[in-house]
Amino acid sequence: MTKSTAPSFTRRTLAKTGAAAAAGLAASRLSVPQTSAKQNGEVTFLNWSALEGTPFPAALKAFQETTGITVNVQPTPTTDYETKFRTLLASGSPPDVMRINDNYVRDFAVAGQLLDLKPFIKSSDPYIESLFTFPITPEGTHPAWSIGNNPRAFFYNVSMFEEAGILPPPGNWTSENWSWDDFLETAKQLTDADAQRWGALIYHDLGWEQTWVVNNGLEAGIYSEDGTKFTFAEPQGIEAMQWVADLTCKHGVQPPWSMLQQDEAANQLFAGGRVGMMFGTLGFTTYLRQNVKDFLWDVAPVPAKVNQMQEGSLIVFCIPKDARNPEAAWQLLEFLAGPEAGKIFAEAGYFVPVWEEAGSAIRPGDEPPAHIGLFTEAAQYNTVVAPNAVGQNVAAQIYRPQVDRVWSCEASAEEVLTSVREQVEETLVTEQ
């Protein structure tokens, strides 16, 4: 039986002490230290991808016009943001505001490299509670700030389905006629090897890991709930990875891994009409609206097996402990999580804003996708990576390079995951 029920909109499950801290915060109102724009002057800002073509420039412009504070956007590294992030944190002069991987907040908080935002925060009232409370640590600190959630689903080429005479996938979050087997059969029908056209693309997006493992029946996902075991290497995890790899290595319905090594390669394949169904976040909507001209596209849910869940990516920023201008940095974070910026992000279909009322702007309009509301529904079927798994950053550096051998059809999922399990678990235990 496929389970289509899920926890409420959340990205992490809080430890009891963290939840208690969140309850205390919810009792009062939000305020910002009263520092003048003249005093603040400038705030430096680093995202992990270029801002052009996204709603961020509009939101940052609105902030500057409202506060008089200049936002100096730092150059974005084209590769290996995580290394850049760690280097800047250790430099002693990092940007004032930095995008941070939601999986690694706990790691950097434990290392004492992030500013505790709790002194700035007086209320959670206007925000989606689970997004607001996500960064809170078991110690009660608030070392990061989530401004929204990017649920995942499948984007699909409606025109390609019509040309192939295939019925479209469901437009709401249901498993009816939409199992892993249904998905694979559909991908086969969409694939045309001679035309170098593929039916599906999944493994370019790391959100597949938690999504497919949980949907294959491993409820905790890639790590155990206590954060000490690499459950990805359990039979359900191995089977899930091999299923994704077999789309390429056995069935030939997914582009080869070698084609996806350049920036934006996956996006370009879909926008170019060469992929029928592609796993991605709500934020992909903005790119497609700007770049797809020759076909109609829409969205569908993740296919189901034991469960039908998805791992949404949180849009999370932090203020480094060594930030030059933390007061102005906080003003920027508060604005990005507020109603004006929230409306900008929602209307663009970029992500579900943390400002609860702003999410109502995510609705069908003149532009595709016709079923954009599915992303709001998807947020109710969210799975989370174990919040207490300290050391995920190091663990990922161990196992993900080895997984490339699976994607390149050089090794099996069982061979790779079992070979790294002991090393990964030693890292997790060491980091506790």
Image (cartoon, helix red, strand yellow):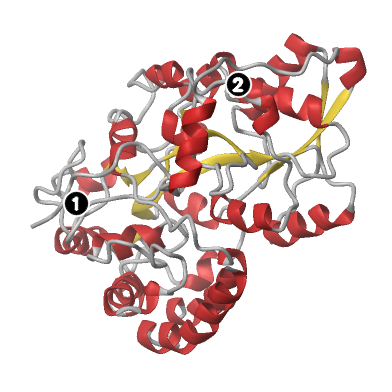
| Residue 122, disc | 2
Sequence-earlier tag: 1 or 2: 2
Query: Quadrant where the C terminus lies?
Result: bottom right
Q: Position of residue 191 (x, y in %)?
A: 28, 62
| Residue 235, disc | none
**Vertical relation: 424 (above or below) 97:** below
Residue at point 66% right, 56% down?
A: 110
Give the side of residue 302 with respect to residue 113, left or right: left
Q: Which quadrant holds residue 397?
A: bottom right
Q: Position of residue 19 (x, y in %)?
A: 45, 40
Residue at point 66% right, 52% down?
A: 109
Q: Give the foreground label among 1 and 2.
A: 2
Residue at point 64% right, 39% down?
A: 317
Quick one: 97 or 274, which is closer to the camera? 97
Secondary structure category for the residue under label 1 = helix
Q: Position of residue 392 (x, y in %)?
A: 55, 65
Secondary structure category for the residue under label 2 = loop
Q: Amino acid at mark 2?
A: Lys
Give the side of residue 129 with respect to residue 322, left or right: left
Residue under pointer 1:
164
Q: Position of residue 188 (x, y in %)?
A: 22, 64
Q: Amino acid at mark 1?
A: Ala
Q: Which quadrant holds residue 382?
A: top left
Quick one: 353 or 106, which is closer to the camera? 106
